[in-house]
Image (spheres, rainbow, N blue to C red):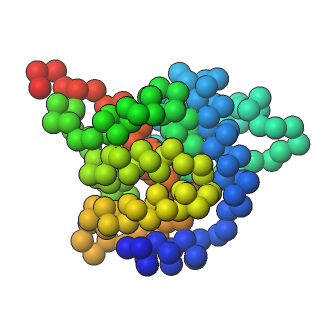
Amino acid sequence: MIAFLAIAIAAAPMNSAFSVQSLHRLGECIAHREPKTAREVLAMDFRSNEYKQKLKAIGTASSSCIPTNSNLQSAGLLFAGAVAEGLLKTEVKKDELPNRLAYDPARDLIEARSPTEEMALCTAFKAPEATAALLQTDPATAKEAEAEDSLASTLRDCLKKDAKIELNRPALRSMLALAAYRIITTPKGVGH
């Protein structure tokens, strides 16, 4: 998987560190200024048109979070992941995140909506410390790359047999942030 990730990363369009970091600052700003709206959007099914429209709307409405004379554009996954990370940082204490991500049989079942989401959820459950450590690194840095590489065996174990997924580093981080956010916001079932 490490070799596969390296190939996928090399084949992906290059994202400048500045662009990736700017997107993360935007996500944090939105999570700080519009947490209710951000939570509502991330609670939706990402496959729906309504989700796509609302995600675009919070990006469009976030002009106060974008520096003057900037034109920041992003794929929906990267933007949603940045918002999810922003919410995680504002709603969960850094040292509590691994425990909140760990598998808990009392938590309601989380049904994955795609093979990539299944892989991300599985990875966060099986490697909560490593997932939390990744989300605590600065984006587009060597420390981020090291943290992602440390998850390679878990990612491979969580990938369905014969499945292939090509991801660049920002996409992988976004998927794991979205999975982590989904895990921590899934309630514990009544009567568990």
For this view, does 11 lie left or right of residue 184? right
Residue placed most toward the observer, 118 or 141: 141
Of the 4 image quadrants, the one containing the C terminus is top left
At x 53%, y 21%, the residue is 36
Residue placed most toward the observer, 100 or 8: 100
**Does residue 112 show up?**
no
From the top left corner, tell me how far across and down residue 90 is, in percent.
52, 27
Question: Quarter of the image holding residue 153?
Answer: bottom left
For this view, does 51 lie left or right of residue 159? right
From the top left corner, tell me how far across and down residue 187 is, in percent.
28, 27
From the top left corner, tell me how far across and down residue 134 is, in percent.
47, 51
From the top left corner, tell me how far across and down residue 112 is, in percent.
30, 48
Question: From this viewpoint, which residue is outermost toward the left?
Answer: 191
Of the 4 image quadrants, the one containing the N terminus is bottom left
For this view, does 181 lie left or right of residue 111? right
At x 17%, y 30%, the residue is 106
Relative to 54, residue 23 above or below = below
**Does residue 11 show up?**
yes
At x 77%, y 37%, the residue is 66
Residue placed most toward the observer, 118 or 101: 101
Question: From this viewpoint, which residue is outermost toward the right?
Answer: 69
